[in-house]
Image: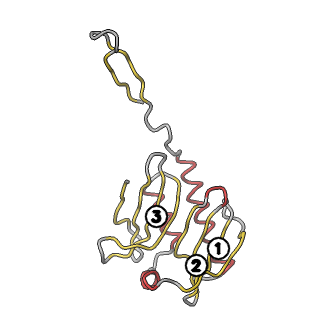
Amino acid sequence: MTFKLVPAAAAGSLLALTLTACGNDSVSSGDAEDSAKRAVAAVTLAESEVGGTAFELDEEGRSGWDVDLVADNEVTEVRVNRDGTKVEKAQSDGRIDADDRLRLERATVSLADAITTAAGEVTGLVKGVELDRHRVTTVVWKVEIYDGDDDIDVSVDVSSGEVVNVDRD
């Protein structure tokens, strides 16, 4: 908590003490760990149950997780429950976008491993992961994490597994 002294409105020489709570919405480390574990479990389950390689993840609140997988250039969108323990549905979603296919071909680090790496860098709730580029030439997993106040994008190199950027909105 921080304390802020402000002039009282009625008396110019008197000061009133105002409490300003900082970080009331911050995410606990336990909640952050649970979020990362559930996200990894959702990706792992989708890959094993449906087949293919995960290349995108979206947290859908109480509905669970949407995991996009590719196999033979065909995308399957898989809804996994919030805990990452049950596939709710799977549906074909057409062919993979050419940019995503090229980016995924460069990946030696899995989406699940990128989540674990990003969660070790920033404390917060996993909101999503997608393939992206950092500074034009570096292909990254962009892991979006919400820390209770801000969305933070953690860019994990798809080849080395190293964090190359942390962008706080």
Query: Where does the image place residue 54, in percent across and percent down from the top left?
Result: 56, 76
Q: Residue furthest bottom?
A: 72
Of labels 1 and 2, earlier in sequence is 2
Residue at the (62%, 56%) spot, across then down: 61
Q: Quadrant of residue 157?
A: bottom left
Mark 2 and mark 1 in contact (Cβ < 8 Å)?
A: yes
Secondary structure state at the residue bearing disc 2: strand
Residue at image coords 38%, 18%: 17
Measured as percent of width and height from the top left, residue 10 is found at: 34, 10
User: Mark 2 — residue?
Assistant: 69
Q: Position of residue 31 (x, y in %)?
A: 57, 49
Residue ID for mark 1: 78
Q: Residue 152, labelled with which disc?
A: none
Three-letter code, disc 1: Val
Q: How far apart, in angstroms, are the residues tagged by discs 2 and 3?
A: 16 Å
Which residue matches tag 3? 143
In three-dimensional space, the C-alpha distance between marks 1 and 2, rounded to whole angstroms, equals 8 Å
